[in-house]
Image (cartoon, grey):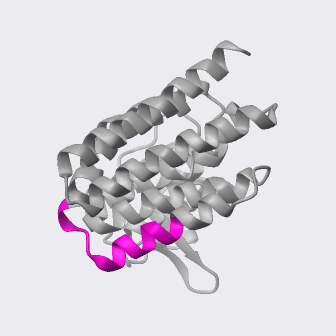
Amino acid sequence: MFTPLGSNKSLTQQVENELTEAIRAGKYLPGNKIPSENELCEIFNVSRTSIREAVKKMSARGIVDVKRGSGVYVSEMSIKNTSENLNLFFELSSDENIILQTINTRLIIEPAIASQAAIFRNHNHIALLKANMIKMRKCNLDNKKREAELDNDFHKILLSIVNNKVLDLLISPIFNLIPKFKTAVFAKPIESRMIDKKNIMLDHHEKILEAIINKDNEKSHQAMREHILETQNNYIKSLQKQ
């Protein structure tokens, strides 16, 4: 089942790679228990330390679940834990290009989401979006964390209207970058500038909402595109000032 271990990588890496490949090949299915620590030591002819480190890394990646007193099981690779891994990647990344690339990704995907939302929205969706706008307008200017949460909520409501689990998996971690983006852009806030930026953002949301209320998918698409382009320009300007 497993290939002999070579010497180009550490023993821990080799064990991790071999076990991961076996899972990918379907030799151990989601929910199945993999061989015990003692068995793996014999299979790979390595120490317990190498096995434990390999399992620890696989657990951190969400590939296996360690159940104390029971053993190690192949994880159920649900949309939830896959999304959590993406969230962790974005949160830990310090690469400025990651944020810019995620904004570019939004520019490709979110106008299409807004367009679909205009087609499939119902009265409950409209009520949620209107309530979000009221909360956004009332949000204190200096409470950027709450503003970022409300901004996220607006876009998440649109995503929920489309009701596509794959899109939810891809886009939700990107939405969660909004607080990081706002911190980067408004690192040294000036009140007048903050008011202007908030009003521009609200105006974009209002145009998107109006198009969705009217079931105008073309205007909804264009309004969202203009909104993301504004976000992109703000971030690029913030990088130029550093």
- Estimate the x, y position of residue 108 in percent, counting from the top left: 30, 36
129 part of magenta stretch: yes
User: Residue at (65%, 48%) from the top-left corner?
Assistant: 179
**Quarter in which the C terminus is drawn:** top right
**Quarter in which the N terminus is drawn:** bottom left
Q: Is residue 146 left or right of residue 167?
A: right
Q: Is residue 36 left or right of residue 210?
A: right
130 part of magenta stretch: yes
Residue extent of the magenta highlight: 119-132
Question: Quadrant location of residue 134?
Answer: bottom right
- Estimate the x, y position of residue 159 in percent, counting from the top left: 35, 61
Viewer-proximal residue, 115 or 167?
115
Against 30, residue 174 (above or below) is above
Can you name the residue that lies furthest to the top here? 240
Residue 239 seen by the camera: yes
Viewer-proximal residue, 196 or 53?
196
User: Residue at (35%, 73%) from the top-left corner?
Assistant: 125
Q: Is residue 27 left or right of residue 195?
A: left
Viewer-proximal residue, 10 or 158?
158
Q: Is residue 137 left or right of residue 206?
A: right
